[in-house]
């Protein structure tokens, strides 16, 4: 009963935040609200007992990405540009996609269903064997680092690649801007 | 941010605690929620907070850009290297039983610690590198406009 109430309150706040993000025009408030959105999702993960995911969501979604968005904001502008295009096409696409997603959830097993595919695969095996095989109290860590070690190696490589990509992109932009600045200055020198 | 006295004092107090918490999350990941990824992010947050309050030049004096870039690659190498070492002992790639053949679960602890360290190092490096890349460009909005 109390859990239903907490979920209800959290989801209401989540939807309210999402609507505010869409309607607001000031980008600074928008970035802050998206941080709030991440924090509320983290709380929802806690009520689902997924503390590891909640931890990541709070640290990355509410912390780092908010800072990076603010850093980006400092390089661009403060308010959203008013769009002159009609909203009919975007609205149609969003409605159809949303309807398809909701239709897809109809086939999903109920929350906490013991016969759900996720419970019948290797998960039960991991839960049963990890105290003997790995002897680590946090099964999430055991699965992540040992049973699924290859996957995590791949994820680490993805993080590295993403960082390298951003660095290449930004340093490339810096070079271009420097060239543009030089080109801008040249005519003044001549005149 | 020269005039924000409270921010500067609180930041100085907090940075140490944040780094300590990052190490706790890193090495306590076997027992409680957390692990390399979360610890890396928290570690990066300590430096980013310092950079925001005291300026990019101050934080780059502590943690130079070239070091951050090398850390990004070092983490992946530590992770992949753990697998190579287990192969040298005659086991499968990333089979942590290699580190303690008599007690496979002890070997698992060592292996998990090593790969989690790799994840933490890479994530710290990438997060700080991205922050440096963004903050290093001259802003177009002046402080008063916020």
Image (cartoon, coloured by chain):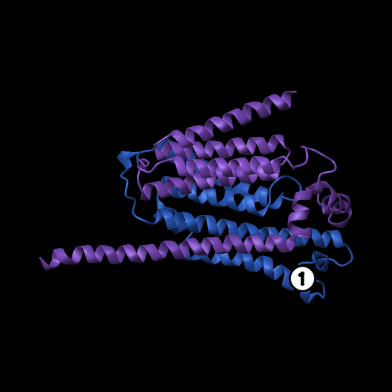
- What residue is shown at x 57% (from left), y 32% (from top)? A15
Where is residue A91? Give x, y as percent.
49, 40
Mark 1 neighbour class, 10 Å CA radius: few under 14, some 14 to 19, many 20 or more = some
Q: Is residue B142 left or right of residue B52?
A: left
Residue at 43% from the left image edge and 34% from the top image edge: A24
Q: Chain of mark 1?
A: B
Q: Which chain is purple?
A: A
- Residue indicated by mark 1: B93
Q: Nearer the viewer, residue B12 or B130?
A: B130
Give the percent coordinates (x, y) of residue A112: 79, 38
Residue B9 in view, yes or no:
no
Place of residue A145 in the rendered image (x, y in percent of width and height, measured from the top left): 74, 58
Q: Where is A1 relative to A161, above or below?
A: above
Q: Element type at marker 1?
A: loop
- Colour blue, chain: B
Say whether residue A70 is visible: yes
In which quadrant of the rendered image does the N terminus of chain A lie?
Answer: top right
Could you tell me which quadrant the C terminus of chain A lies in? bottom left
Q: Quadrant of residue B133?
A: bottom left
Question: In this picture, is A182 found above or below A90?
Answer: below
Q: Residue at x 63, y 26 (%)?
A: A9
Residue occupying image coordinates x 68% and y 44% = A104
Between A104 and B5, the one lying in front of the other is A104
Residue A181 placement (x, y as % from top left): 26, 62
**A175 shown above or below B128:** below
């Amino acid at each position: 009963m109390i859990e239903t109430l907490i979920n209800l309150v959290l989801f209401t706040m989540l939807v309210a935040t999402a609507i505010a993000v869409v309607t607001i025009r000031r980008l600074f408030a928008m970035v802050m609200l998206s941080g709030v959105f991440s924090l509320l999702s983290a709380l929802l993960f806690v009520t689902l007992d997924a503390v590891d995911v909640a931890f990541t969501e709070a640290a990355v979604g509410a912390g780092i990405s908010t800072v990076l968005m603010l850093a980006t904001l400092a390089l661009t502008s403060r308010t959203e540009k008013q769009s002159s295009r009609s909203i009919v096409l975007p609205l149609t696409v969003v409605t159809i996609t949303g309807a398809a997603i909701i239709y897809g959830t109809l086939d999903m097993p109920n929350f906490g269903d013991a016969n759900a595919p996720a419970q019948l695969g290797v998960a039960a095996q991991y839960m049963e064997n990890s105290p003997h095989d790995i002897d680590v109290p946090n099964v999430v860590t055991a699965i992540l680092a040992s049973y699924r070690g290859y996957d995590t190696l791949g994820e680490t490589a993805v993080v590295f690649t993403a960082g390298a990509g951003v660095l290449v992109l930004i340093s490339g932009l810096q070079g271009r801007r420097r060239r543009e600045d030089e080109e801008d200055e040249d005519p003044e020198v001549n005149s | 941010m020269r005039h924000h006295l409270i921010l500067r004092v609180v930041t100085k107090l907090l940075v140490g605690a944040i780094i300590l918490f990052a190490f706790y999350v890193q090495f306590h990941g076997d027992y409680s929620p957390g692990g390399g990824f979360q610890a890396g992010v928290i570690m990066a947050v300590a430096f980013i907070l310092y950079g925001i309050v005291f300026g990019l030049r101050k934080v780059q004096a502590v943690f130079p850009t070239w070091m951050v870039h090398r850390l990004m690659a070092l983490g992946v190498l530590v992770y992949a290297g753990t697998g190579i070492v287990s192969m040298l002992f005659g086991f499968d790639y990333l089979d942590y039983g290699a580190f303690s053949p008599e007690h496979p679960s002890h070997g698992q602890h060592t292996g998990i610690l090593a790969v989690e360290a790799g994840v933490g190092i890479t994530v710290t490096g990438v997060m700080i590198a991205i922050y440096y890349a963004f903050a290093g460009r001259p802003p177009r909005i002046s402080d008063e406009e916020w």
